[in-house]
Image (spheres, helix red, strand yellow):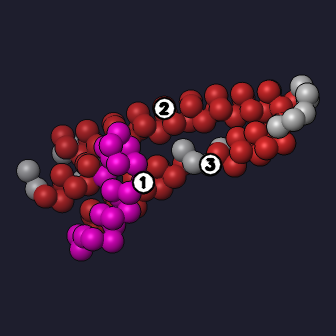
């Protein structure tokens, strides 16, 4: 198996073991343009999971010490949204990694 295929596939599968770090390091360390392309796509897809975090932090900070009904709804809703979004992104990355290893997308 080609080294570029292995590295490209691992950049997607790093959602399971290295998160954002592996695709970022791979993007700067490799010279192969295809591997760089897949590392960039994997890195950006890993960043998608961080989009709702500011909403969670805002809901947690504004709700401390207050008995508002909106706090639990916003906080719990944003946490549930983050969990669902993370699962979708993780499954998508696993599928992309397997496709690269199988030779369907390269």
Q: Which residue is mark 1?
A: 20
Q: Is residue 41 visible?
A: no
Residue 36 falls within the magenta-colored stretch: no
Q: Is residue 84 visible?
A: yes
Can you give x and y, in whole percent of width and height, for residue 104 in the image?
23, 43
Q: Quadrant of residue 77?
A: top right
Q: Quadrant of residue 99?
A: top left
**Residue depicted at 8% across the width and 50% down the height:** 1
Q: Which residue is mark 2?
A: 87
| Between 63 and 34, the one nearer to me in the picture | 63
In the rendered structure, the answer to whether residue 1 lies left or right of residue 39 reads left
**Residue depicted at 25% across the width and 70% down the height:** 30
| Between 99 and 62, the one nearer to me in the picture | 62
Q: Is residue 44 above or below residue 96?
A: below
Can you give x and y, in whole percent of width and height, for residue 79 in the image?
65, 32
Can you give x and y, in whole percent of width and height, for residue 42 in the image?
39, 53
Mark pair 2, 1: CA separation: 16 Å
Mark pair 3, 1: CA separation: 14 Å
Stretch of the chain drawn in magenta: 11-32
| Crowd rating for badge 2 (residues with CA inside 10 Å; few <14, some 14–19, many 20+) | few
**Residue depicted at 64% across the width and 45% down the height:** 53
| Crowd rating for badge 1 (residues with CA inside 10 Å; few <14, some 14–19, many 20+) | some
In the rendered structure, the answer to whether residue 92 lies left or right of residue 26 reads right
Q: Which residue is mark 3?
A: 51
Q: Secondary structure at mark 3?
A: loop
């Amino acid at each position: 198996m080609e080294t570029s295929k292995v590295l490209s596939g691992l950049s997607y599968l790093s959602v399971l073991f290295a998160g954002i770090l592996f695709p970022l390091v791979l993007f700067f360390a490799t010279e192969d343009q295809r591997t760089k392309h897949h590392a960039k796509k994997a890195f950006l897809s890993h960043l998608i999971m961080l989009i709702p975090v500011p909403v969670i932090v805002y809901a947690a900070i504004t709700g401390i010490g207050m008995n508002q009904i909106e706090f639990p709804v916003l906080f719990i809703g944003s946490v549930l949204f983050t969990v669902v979004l993370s699962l979708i992104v993780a499954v998508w990355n696993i599928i992309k990694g397997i496709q690269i290893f199988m030779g369907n997308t390269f």
